[in-house]
Amino acid sequence: MWRRTVLGEEDDKLLTISDVARLLNISERSVYRLVGAGKLHGFKPGGGAWRFRRSDIDAWVEDQVRCRAARSGTKAPE
């Protein structure tokens, strides 16, 4: 499973926009776009900066892998 083998950290850790961008190997602007499109879910504690649960990001990545595999007709890695 991607969560355990690649990331190897606790699921409840809170991540910043910068953390998510680094994990997904995308720009911070792309993270903001994904949030704006409703594809990534985060929250703003006290109206401040965005925070994301590590488990939510892991689940989103796994969903993306499954969807891509389904579209291409291949089996998703386990």
Image (cartoon, helix red, strand yellow):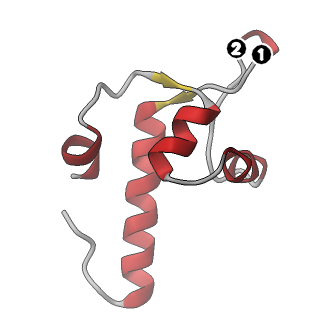
> Horizontal and vertical percent for residue 59?
41, 47
- Of 19 and 71, nearer the camera is 19
Is residue 29 placed above or below 41 in the rendered structure? below
Left or right: residue 25 compared with residue 27: left
> Horizontal and vertical percent for residue 34?
69, 52
Q: Secondary structure at mark 1?
A: loop
Query: Label 1 crowding class (10 Å Cα cut-off): few <14, some 14-19, many 20+?
Result: few
Q: Residue at x 78, y 48 (%)?
A: 36
> Horizontal and vertical percent for residue 41?
62, 40
Q: Residue at x 46, y 64 (%)?
A: 64
Asked whether disc 2 touches disc 1, contact meaning CB atoms under 8 Å apart, the reply is: yes
- Of 71 and 17, nearer the camera is 17
Q: Mark 2 or 1, which is nearer the eye?
A: 1
* Residue type indicated by callout 1: Gly
Q: Label 2: which residue? A: 45
Is residue 64 placed above or below 43 in the rendered structure? below
Image quadrant containing the C terminus = bottom left
Q: Secondary structure at mark 2?
A: helix
Q: Label 1: which residue? A: 48
Query: Label 2 crowding class (10 Å Cα cut-off): few <14, some 14-19, many 20+?
Result: few
Left or right: residue 14 compared with residue 28: left
Is residue 8 placed above or below 27 in the rendered structure? above
Q: Which mark is residue 57?
A: none
> Horizontal and vertical percent for residue 44?
72, 21
Is residue 41 placed above or below 68 in the rendered structure? above
Left or right: residue 40 compared with residue 57: right
Q: CA distance from mark 2 to mark 1?
A: 6 Å
* Residue type indicated by callout 2: Pro
Q: Residue at x 39, y 81 (%)?
A: 70
Left or right: residue 59 compared with residue 30: left
Q: Residue at x 39, y 67 (%)?
A: 65
- Of 17 and 63, nearer the camera is 17
